[in-house]
Amino acid sequence: MKFVDLSAVIEQTPKEGPEFLRTDIVYHSHAEGAADVEAILKVPASLMRHGEGWATETITHLSTHGATHIDAPWHYNSLIQGERPMTIDELPLEWFFSDGVVLNMTRKADGDGVTVSDVQKKLEQIGYALKPLDIVLIRTGRDAFYTQPDYMFRGCGVTAEATKWLFEQGVRVMGIDAWSWDAPLDRQAKEAMESGQPGILWAAHQADLPYAHIERLVNLGALPSHGFKVSCFPLKIKGGSAGPARIVALVE
Protein backbone atom coordinates (compact mmCIF):
# COMPACT_ATOMS: atom_id res chain seq x y z
CA MET A 1 0.00 0.00 0.00
CA LYS A 2 1.34 3.43 -0.99
CA PHE A 3 0.14 6.59 0.75
CA VAL A 4 -0.10 9.76 -1.36
CA ASP A 5 -0.50 13.05 0.51
CA LEU A 6 -3.04 15.25 -1.27
CA SER A 7 -2.95 18.09 1.28
CA ALA A 8 -0.90 21.25 1.19
CA VAL A 9 1.11 22.13 4.27
CA ILE A 10 -0.44 24.56 6.76
CA GLU A 11 2.10 27.36 7.08
CA GLN A 12 2.52 31.05 7.74
CA THR A 13 0.85 33.18 5.07
CA PRO A 14 3.23 35.56 3.26
CA LYS A 15 2.69 39.25 3.90
CA GLU A 16 1.17 39.73 0.44
CA GLY A 17 -1.40 36.96 1.02
CA PRO A 18 -5.14 37.77 1.21
CA GLU A 19 -6.07 38.96 4.70
CA PHE A 20 -9.36 37.04 4.88
CA LEU A 21 -7.55 33.71 4.38
CA ARG A 22 -4.48 34.36 6.52
CA THR A 23 -2.75 31.74 8.61
CA ASP A 24 -0.57 33.04 11.45
CA ILE A 25 1.52 30.64 13.54
CA VAL A 26 3.68 31.44 16.58
CA TYR A 27 6.42 28.87 17.20
CA HIS A 28 7.51 28.38 20.83
CA SER A 29 11.01 27.02 21.39
CA HIS A 30 12.24 24.26 23.71
CA ALA A 31 13.76 26.97 25.92
CA GLU A 32 10.34 28.60 26.24
CA GLY A 33 8.94 25.16 27.06
CA ALA A 34 11.51 24.76 29.83
CA ALA A 35 10.44 28.10 31.27
CA ASP A 36 6.81 26.91 31.17
CA VAL A 37 7.72 23.70 32.98
CA GLU A 38 9.53 25.65 35.70
CA ALA A 39 6.60 28.06 36.06
CA ILE A 40 3.92 25.34 36.15
CA LEU A 41 5.68 22.39 37.83
CA LYS A 42 8.53 24.18 39.66
CA VAL A 43 11.06 21.86 37.95
CA PRO A 44 14.22 23.68 36.81
CA ALA A 45 15.61 23.23 33.29
CA SER A 46 18.68 21.52 34.78
CA LEU A 47 16.51 18.48 35.53
CA MET A 48 15.31 18.14 31.92
CA ARG A 49 17.13 16.45 29.05
CA HIS A 50 19.48 18.97 27.40
CA GLY A 51 17.85 21.59 29.61
CA GLU A 52 14.89 21.68 27.25
CA GLY A 53 11.13 21.57 27.71
CA TRP A 54 8.40 21.06 25.15
CA ALA A 55 8.24 22.80 21.79
CA THR A 56 4.75 24.01 20.93
CA GLU A 57 2.94 26.15 18.39
CA THR A 58 0.02 28.55 18.69
CA ILE A 59 -2.11 29.15 15.62
CA THR A 60 -3.29 32.71 16.19
CA HIS A 61 -5.27 32.94 12.98
CA LEU A 62 -6.56 30.15 10.73
CA SER A 63 -9.47 30.41 8.34
CA THR A 64 -11.32 27.12 7.95
CA HIS A 65 -10.93 27.75 4.21
CA GLY A 66 -7.28 28.85 4.36
CA ALA A 67 -5.61 25.54 3.49
CA THR A 68 -6.66 22.19 2.01
CA HIS A 69 -10.17 21.88 3.39
CA ILE A 70 -13.64 20.39 2.99
CA ASP A 71 -16.64 22.66 2.52
CA ALA A 72 -19.87 21.67 4.24
CA PRO A 73 -23.31 22.43 2.72
CA TRP A 74 -23.79 25.19 5.33
CA HIS A 75 -21.03 27.13 3.53
CA TYR A 76 -23.15 27.51 0.41
CA ASN A 77 -26.50 28.75 1.76
CA SER A 78 -28.58 28.93 4.94
CA LEU A 79 -31.29 26.83 3.24
CA ILE A 80 -30.70 23.98 0.80
CA GLN A 81 -33.67 22.19 -0.70
CA GLY A 82 -35.82 24.06 1.81
CA GLU A 83 -33.98 22.84 4.90
CA ARG A 84 -31.11 23.97 7.11
CA PRO A 85 -28.00 22.29 5.65
CA MET A 86 -25.45 20.32 7.65
CA THR A 87 -22.37 21.96 9.13
CA ILE A 88 -18.98 20.28 8.98
CA ASP A 89 -19.39 18.53 12.34
CA GLU A 90 -22.72 17.02 11.27
CA LEU A 91 -21.64 15.31 8.05
CA PRO A 92 -21.67 11.47 7.96
CA LEU A 93 -18.25 9.91 8.48
CA GLU A 94 -19.11 7.37 5.76
CA TRP A 95 -18.73 10.11 3.17
CA PHE A 96 -15.04 10.60 3.89
CA PHE A 97 -13.47 7.20 3.31
CA SER A 98 -14.30 5.64 -0.02
CA ASP A 99 -13.09 4.71 -3.50
CA GLY A 100 -11.51 7.59 -5.37
CA VAL A 101 -11.65 8.61 -9.03
CA VAL A 102 -9.42 11.22 -10.71
CA LEU A 103 -10.73 13.00 -13.81
CA ASN A 104 -7.93 14.74 -15.71
CA MET A 105 -9.06 18.18 -16.87
CA THR A 106 -5.61 19.73 -17.19
CA ARG A 107 -6.25 20.72 -20.80
CA LYS A 108 -8.98 23.08 -19.67
CA ALA A 109 -7.98 26.75 -19.67
CA ASP A 110 -8.48 29.05 -16.71
CA GLY A 111 -12.15 29.96 -16.51
CA ASP A 112 -13.37 27.07 -18.67
CA GLY A 113 -16.20 25.05 -17.18
CA VAL A 114 -16.06 21.31 -16.59
CA THR A 115 -19.37 20.17 -18.08
CA VAL A 116 -21.50 17.05 -17.74
CA SER A 117 -20.24 15.93 -21.13
CA ASP A 118 -16.61 16.41 -20.02
CA VAL A 119 -17.18 14.24 -16.96
CA GLN A 120 -19.04 11.53 -18.87
CA LYS A 121 -16.43 11.38 -21.64
CA LYS A 122 -13.56 11.15 -19.17
CA LEU A 123 -15.29 8.35 -17.24
CA GLU A 124 -15.77 6.48 -20.52
CA GLN A 125 -12.11 6.99 -21.43
CA ILE A 126 -10.87 5.53 -18.15
CA GLY A 127 -13.48 2.77 -18.18
CA TYR A 128 -15.07 3.58 -14.86
CA ALA A 129 -18.72 3.62 -13.77
CA LEU A 130 -19.50 5.77 -10.77
CA LYS A 131 -21.23 4.30 -7.74
CA PRO A 132 -22.72 5.96 -4.65
CA LEU A 133 -20.20 7.53 -2.25
CA ASP A 134 -17.32 7.47 -4.72
CA ILE A 135 -15.04 10.47 -4.11
CA VAL A 136 -14.50 12.28 -7.42
CA LEU A 137 -11.37 14.43 -7.73
CA ILE A 138 -10.95 16.91 -10.59
CA ARG A 139 -7.33 17.37 -11.66
CA THR A 140 -6.65 20.79 -13.15
CA GLY A 141 -2.90 20.99 -12.50
CA ARG A 142 -3.31 24.35 -10.79
CA ASP A 143 -1.66 23.03 -7.63
CA ALA A 144 1.55 24.02 -9.43
CA PHE A 145 0.62 27.62 -8.60
CA TYR A 146 -0.34 26.98 -4.96
CA THR A 147 2.22 29.42 -3.52
CA GLN A 148 1.79 32.06 -6.23
CA PRO A 149 -0.09 35.35 -5.63
CA ASP A 150 -2.52 34.66 -8.49
CA TYR A 151 -3.39 31.11 -7.36
CA MET A 152 -6.99 32.04 -6.49
CA PHE A 153 -7.57 33.30 -10.04
CA ARG A 154 -6.50 30.06 -11.72
CA GLY A 155 -8.54 26.98 -12.47
CA CYS A 156 -11.19 25.73 -14.83
CA GLY A 157 -13.98 25.18 -12.29
CA VAL A 158 -16.85 22.72 -12.32
CA THR A 159 -20.25 23.81 -13.63
CA ALA A 160 -23.42 23.61 -11.53
CA GLU A 161 -24.83 21.12 -14.05
CA ALA A 162 -21.84 18.78 -13.71
CA THR A 163 -22.04 19.08 -9.93
CA LYS A 164 -25.72 18.13 -10.04
CA TRP A 165 -25.00 15.19 -12.33
CA LEU A 166 -22.33 13.85 -9.97
CA PHE A 167 -24.71 14.26 -7.04
CA GLU A 168 -27.38 12.31 -8.94
CA GLN A 169 -24.90 9.42 -9.29
CA GLY A 170 -24.67 9.25 -5.50
CA VAL A 171 -21.42 11.19 -5.15
CA ARG A 172 -21.39 13.24 -1.94
CA VAL A 173 -17.74 14.34 -1.77
CA MET A 174 -16.01 15.97 -4.73
CA GLY A 175 -12.65 17.69 -4.85
CA ILE A 176 -10.39 19.85 -6.98
CA ASP A 177 -6.70 20.87 -7.02
CA ALA A 178 -7.54 24.54 -7.44
CA TRP A 179 -8.53 27.39 -5.13
CA SER A 180 -12.23 26.88 -5.75
CA TRP A 181 -14.66 24.22 -7.00
CA ASP A 182 -16.24 26.99 -9.07
CA ALA A 183 -14.42 28.79 -11.84
CA PRO A 184 -12.22 31.69 -10.62
CA LEU A 185 -14.44 34.21 -8.87
CA ASP A 186 -13.04 37.23 -10.71
CA ARG A 187 -14.27 35.75 -14.00
CA GLN A 188 -17.63 34.73 -12.57
CA ALA A 189 -18.04 38.17 -11.00
CA LYS A 190 -17.39 39.90 -14.34
CA GLU A 191 -19.90 37.65 -16.10
CA ALA A 192 -22.50 38.17 -13.38
CA MET A 193 -22.17 41.96 -13.50
CA GLU A 194 -22.33 42.05 -17.30
CA SER A 195 -25.43 39.85 -17.43
CA GLY A 196 -27.18 41.26 -14.37
CA GLN A 197 -28.50 37.77 -13.70
CA PRO A 198 -28.34 35.78 -10.43
CA GLY A 199 -27.03 32.24 -10.45
CA ILE A 200 -23.74 32.92 -12.25
CA LEU A 201 -21.46 33.86 -9.37
CA TRP A 202 -20.65 30.82 -7.22
CA ALA A 203 -23.04 28.70 -9.31
CA ALA A 204 -21.70 25.26 -8.38
CA HIS A 205 -21.48 26.12 -4.70
CA GLN A 206 -25.03 27.43 -4.69
CA ALA A 207 -26.52 24.57 -6.74
CA ASP A 208 -29.02 23.81 -3.95
CA LEU A 209 -27.36 20.47 -3.17
CA PRO A 210 -26.38 19.02 0.26
CA TYR A 211 -22.93 17.86 -0.84
CA ALA A 212 -19.35 18.45 0.33
CA HIS A 213 -16.34 19.35 -1.73
CA ILE A 214 -12.60 19.54 -1.17
CA GLU A 215 -10.63 22.56 -2.34
CA ARG A 216 -6.89 23.27 -2.63
CA LEU A 217 -5.77 19.67 -3.18
CA VAL A 218 -2.26 18.86 -4.40
CA ASN A 219 -0.50 15.87 -6.01
CA LEU A 220 -3.45 14.46 -7.95
CA GLY A 221 -0.98 13.78 -10.76
CA ALA A 222 0.60 11.07 -8.59
CA LEU A 223 -2.59 9.00 -8.63
CA PRO A 224 -4.03 6.51 -11.11
CA SER A 225 -7.44 7.36 -12.54
CA HIS A 226 -9.08 4.87 -10.15
CA GLY A 227 -8.30 1.84 -8.01
CA PHE A 228 -7.45 3.70 -4.80
CA LYS A 229 -9.11 4.79 -1.56
CA VAL A 230 -9.40 8.34 -0.27
CA SER A 231 -9.33 9.25 3.41
CA CYS A 232 -10.46 12.84 3.95
CA PHE A 233 -11.92 13.36 7.42
CA PRO A 234 -12.36 17.09 8.22
CA LEU A 235 -11.71 18.67 11.61
CA LYS A 236 -14.86 18.51 13.74
CA ILE A 237 -15.53 22.23 14.14
CA LYS A 238 -18.82 22.99 15.89
CA GLY A 239 -21.15 24.75 13.47
CA GLY A 240 -18.35 25.09 10.93
CA SER A 241 -18.81 25.92 7.26
CA ALA A 242 -15.64 23.96 6.52
CA GLY A 243 -12.86 22.01 8.15
CA PRO A 244 -9.16 21.74 7.28
CA ALA A 245 -8.32 18.10 6.52
CA ARG A 246 -5.38 15.82 5.84
CA ILE A 247 -6.41 14.23 2.56
CA VAL A 248 -4.58 10.98 1.80
CA ALA A 249 -4.95 8.50 -1.05
CA LEU A 250 -4.23 4.82 -0.38
CA VAL A 251 -2.99 3.17 -3.56
CA GLU A 252 -2.52 -0.60 -3.89
Image (cartoon, rainbow, N blue to C red):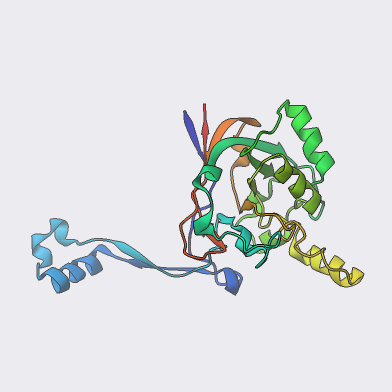
- Please give the name of the residue rendered at 28% of the width and 61% of the height, measured from the top-left corner: 55
The x and y percentages for residue 38 are: 14, 70
Q: Position of residue 232 (x, y in %)?
A: 52, 46
Of residue 102 and residue 32, the one placed in the foreground of this image is 102
Give the percent coordinates (x, y) of residue 118: 81, 40
Outermost residue to the right: 195
The image quadrant that residue 68 belongs to is bottom right
Camera-nearest residue between 133 and 250:
133
Does residue 250 lie above or below 197 as drawn? above
Residue at position x 23%, y 66% in the image: 33
Say whether residue 35 is left or right of residue 169.
left
Displayed quadrant of residue 150: bottom right
**x, y percentage for residue 31?**
22, 66
Instruction: Please give the name of the residue rendered at 85% of the width and 68% of the height, measured from the top-left corner.
Output: 192
Which residue appears at 70% of the width and 62% of the height?
82
Q: Is residue 102 above or below residue 40?
A: above
Question: Of 115 and 58, which appears nearest the observer?
Answer: 115
* Occupied quadrant, residue 111: bottom right
Q: How many marks?
A: 0
